[in-house]
């Protein structure tokens, strides 16, 4: 298929579709640092700088993919909803589809949109698709089940004018058991910038990589290693946790500070997920309609559903289409990550002790031990100079 990649970021959608045999013929991305990555990694592909200024899609496009902005739909964001200045840009996709209908559409965003404002965002999207004559299906999918040690749930929507998107998105279901907490044997990821309302705890994985700050303040997670040391992953391992090659985002440093690479990686679509979708676009599976149930008229939406202008149904299916377990996080890491500083550890420890949260047995004690060692090490270095 010929692919148009809108809100392309660093090309996670497009790289996975390419690996599945499809060809990207146009990209659209407004951030200069992301465009620098796309120019280096997709040489010869035209890059449009602003979707608002795109008047038409190129002739011959078979599938449009778009990981549209999540800032207004994210639980950690502004929660304004689909009418927000950023997430509302998905309307530009429908504008282009109305002018130039294409056989297939694939969208991606955060699953919080299914409950925010009673699922208004997804309800609006599928209504627009039905008005344009599309059949649709959506599903929450977890990157962890694609062999990557990152707990990253995202909702994917596939729509088609003449195909059956449920056979692409809802045919595969291979539940994967998640590991249980074991501080002595497994690495555990968490967000050291949190600690009062939650910490994004992930066993043998990192929690969802974030897109960080718009001004380039990085937001990497912390990892409590089995040794008791607490580190932050190297950016190259973060890229690998999204399915990219190490240093995939290095060209971004030609257009912005190196710290912006964290935001680019955190915003990306996980490559193995889009590869699976690309493979299913080429060779659809078979959806079992016995999974269907009632679609709610009001309130939060189910985590999977399908429908068209004649009716909608919820779908009982898990987040693991492929069910490939990743290697242990401690074995996955290839680059030496920096140790979490005494200052950062102290701030997290203070917040965590004051919070009314339940932590894994031994976790806070491990943080305290790391803090004491970090203080001693930094004092030793200071005295040496």
Image (cartoon, rainbow, N blue to C red):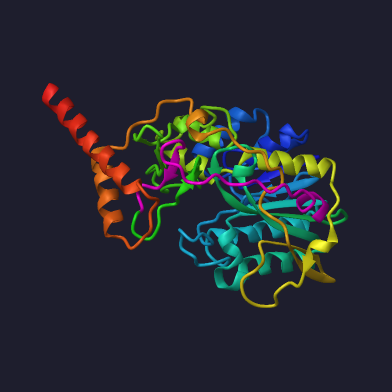
- One can see residue 269 in this view: no
Above or below: residue 291 compared with residue 8: below
Magenta span contains residue 162: no
User: 272 or 253, which lies in front?
Assistant: 272
The stretch in magenta equals 166-194
Q: Quadrant of residue 366?
A: top left
Residue 313 is left or right of residue 230, and the answer is right
User: 124 or 369, which lies in front?
Assistant: 369
x 72%, y 55%: residue: 96
Residue 132 locus on image (x, y percent):
79, 64
Residue 369 locus on image (x, y percent):
26, 39
Q: Quadrant of residue 230?
A: top left
In the rendered image, the residue lying farthest to the bottom is 298
x 25%, y 52%: residue: 350
Above or below: residue 270 compared with residue 382: below
Above or below: residue 100 compared with residue 38: below
In the rendered image, the residue lying farthest to the top is 384
Magenta span contains residue 185: yes
- One can see residue 184 in this view: yes
The quadrant of the image that shows the N terminus is top right
Magenta span: helix, strand or loop, mainly? loop
User: 337 or 267, which lies in front?
Assistant: 337
In the rendered image, the residue lying farthest to the right is 162
Residue 105 is left or right of residue 179, and the answer is right
User: 222 or 279, which lies in front?
Assistant: 222
Q: Quadrant of residue 383?
A: top left
Residue 16 locus on image (x, y percent):
68, 37
Residue 183 locus on image (x, y percent):
41, 41
Q: Number of marks in the image?
A: 0
The quadrant of the image that shows the C terminus is top left
């Amino acid at each position: 298929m010929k692919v148009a990649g809108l809100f392309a970021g660093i090309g996670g959608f497009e790289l996975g579709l390419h690996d599945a045999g499809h060809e990207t013929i146009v990209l659209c991305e407004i951030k200069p640092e992301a465009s620098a990555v796309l120019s280096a990694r997709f040489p010869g592909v035209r890059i449009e700088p602003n979707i608002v200024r795109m008047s038409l899609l190129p002739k011959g496009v078979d599938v449009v993919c778009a990981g549209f902005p999540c800032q207004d739909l994210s639980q950690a964001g502004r929660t304004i909803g689909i009418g927000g200045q950023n997430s509302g840009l998905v309307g530009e996709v429908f504008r282009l589809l109305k002018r130039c209908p294409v056989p297939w559409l694939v969208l991606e965003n955060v699953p919080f949109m299914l409950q925010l404002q009673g699922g208004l965002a997804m309800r609006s999207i599928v209504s627009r698709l039905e008005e344009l004559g599309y059949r649709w299906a959506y599903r929450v999918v977890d990157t962890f089940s694609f062999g990557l040690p990152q707990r990253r749930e995202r909702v994917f929507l596939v729509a088609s004018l003449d195909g059956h998107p449920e056979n692409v998105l809802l045919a595969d279901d291979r539940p994967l058991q998640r590991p249980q907490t074991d501080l002595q044997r497994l690495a555990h990821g968490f967000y050291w910038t949190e600690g009062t309302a939650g910490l994004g705890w992930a066993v043998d994985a990192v929690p969802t990589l974030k897109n960080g700050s718009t001004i380039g303040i990085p937001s990497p997670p912390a990892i409590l290693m089995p040794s008791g040391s607490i580190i932050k992953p190297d950016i190259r391992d973060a890229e690998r946790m999204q399915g990219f090659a190490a240093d995939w985002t290095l060209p971004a440093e030609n257009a912005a500070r190196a710290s912006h690479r964290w935001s680019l990686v955190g915003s990306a679509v996980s490559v193995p997920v889009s590869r699976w979708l690309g493979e299913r676009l080429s060779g659809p599976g078979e959806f079992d309609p016995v999974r269907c149930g009632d679609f709610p008229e009001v309130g939060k939406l189910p985590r999977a559903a399908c429908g068209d202008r004649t009716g909608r149904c919820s779908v009982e299916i898990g987040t693991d289409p492929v069910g490939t377990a990743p290697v242990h996080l401690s074995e996955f890491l290839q680059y030496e990550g920096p140790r979490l500083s005494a200052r950062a550890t102290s701030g997290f420890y203070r917040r965590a002790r004051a919070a009314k949260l339940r932590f894994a047995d031994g976790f806070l004690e491990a943080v305290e031990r790391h803090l004491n060692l970090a203080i001693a090490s930094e004092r030793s270095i200071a005295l040496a100079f």
